[in-house]
Amino acid sequence: MVAKKSKGKVFVGMSGGVDSSVSAALLQKAGYEVTGVFMKVWQPDFLPCTWREERLDAMRVAATLGITLLTWDFEREYKEGVADYMIREYKAGRTPNPDVMCNREVKFGAFFRRSTKEGADFVATGHYAQVVHDKKENKFKMLAGVDATKDQSYFLWTLGQEQLSKTFFPIGGYKKSQVRALAQKFGLPVAEKNDSQGLCFVGKLDMKDFLAHFIKEKEGSVLNEKGEAIGTHSGAYFYTLGERHGFTVTKKSADDTPFYVVKKDLVANTITVAHMQKTALECASQELRASQASFCGGVPPDTKKTYTAQVRYHGEQHKCKITALNTNTLSLRLEKPAVFDAGQSVVLYDGNECLGGGIIETT
């Protein structure tokens, strides 16, 4: 019997979770030569060390599928490109998105480069997104995942044509429930495993507790819109515009609706809060400027068209127009005011196609 010819070598980032495991199984079934790669990254010593357990799960899946599992150490890349970046941004009073940097610096940075160097034709991950080849335009496009509740295209806006042309997102066309069913069908030992949540690779954590190990807490005043002190907080660095948790209001009013952060002063170490339902927020804006702009299609979008912009994961999509576009700077005007903070990612969409994005610089 003549062995079936492989469609190519694929290195799959396997975390030990359901999504990446099913991704590996689907590619193997499709006729690819699959190699699993467990990425070991930096973890702070004050959090539970879970990577050994996760790798053991990945090893069990690899054994079930009969594929090789490699372990690659990206501790330095993660520490410098994700953790240090995140801490530095918070110290500057900005609100970073570490998952975006994790994809850019680790999964589609260090992992992508090493996989290519070691002979992989393609790489794959368990992200809920889709890559399609538009033959008419001769380019690769990134689309949102079919499961809107799991779509992760927002975190992948930094990917360009080089990565997209060699990347598979095997589960992007499925709903989560279908992925679970496939895990059962393939007999994967992680079929019932809970989803991982929280910071990329590190998992679920309280961000303020995490940052407190690197940024000294400093109690400050919570102000109302009149400038009156009505409570306390642990440091203006830790807060994001629009946030409604993590500070204490001691002077209550008859209106018990939630307070939201509408302004922060790093020098005075104060945050100003307001009831969103009752005031025209001073932190809301229609104008947005972003740096480090990059576009999945390799070329800037059409400035004459109307697109939608998303400023937080699973947040509202705002209709917008591009008002300025330079080498790596993007300016937008939103159809209606929105709340966003410097450091967050703004991601552009044309329907369900992710066009790219940038890092918000001004609010």
Image (cartoon, helix red, strand yellow):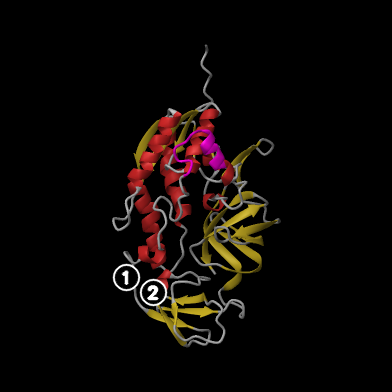
Circle 1 residues within 10 Å: few <14, some 14–19, many ≥20: few
Image vertical order of residue 60 relative to residue 284, above or below: above
Give amino acid for label 1: Lys
What residue occupies the far left of the structure in this picture? 45
Q: Is residue 126 at all visible to an observer of this figure? A: yes
Residue range highlighted in magenta = 179-192
Please name whichever residue, 214 or 292, is drawn nearer the observer in this view of the structure.
214
Q: Which mark is residue 235?
A: 2
Nearer the observer, 47 or 341: 47
Give the spatial CA distance, label 2 vs label 1.
8 Å
Q: Looking at the picture, how far across and down is residue 135, in whole percent? A: 67, 35
The residue drawn where x is 46% and y is 76% is 264
Question: From the viewer's perspective, is 64 left or right of 259?
Answer: left
| Tags 2 and 1 touching, CB below 8 Å | yes
Is residue 190 shown in magenta?
Answer: yes
Q: Mark 1 points at which residue?
A: 216
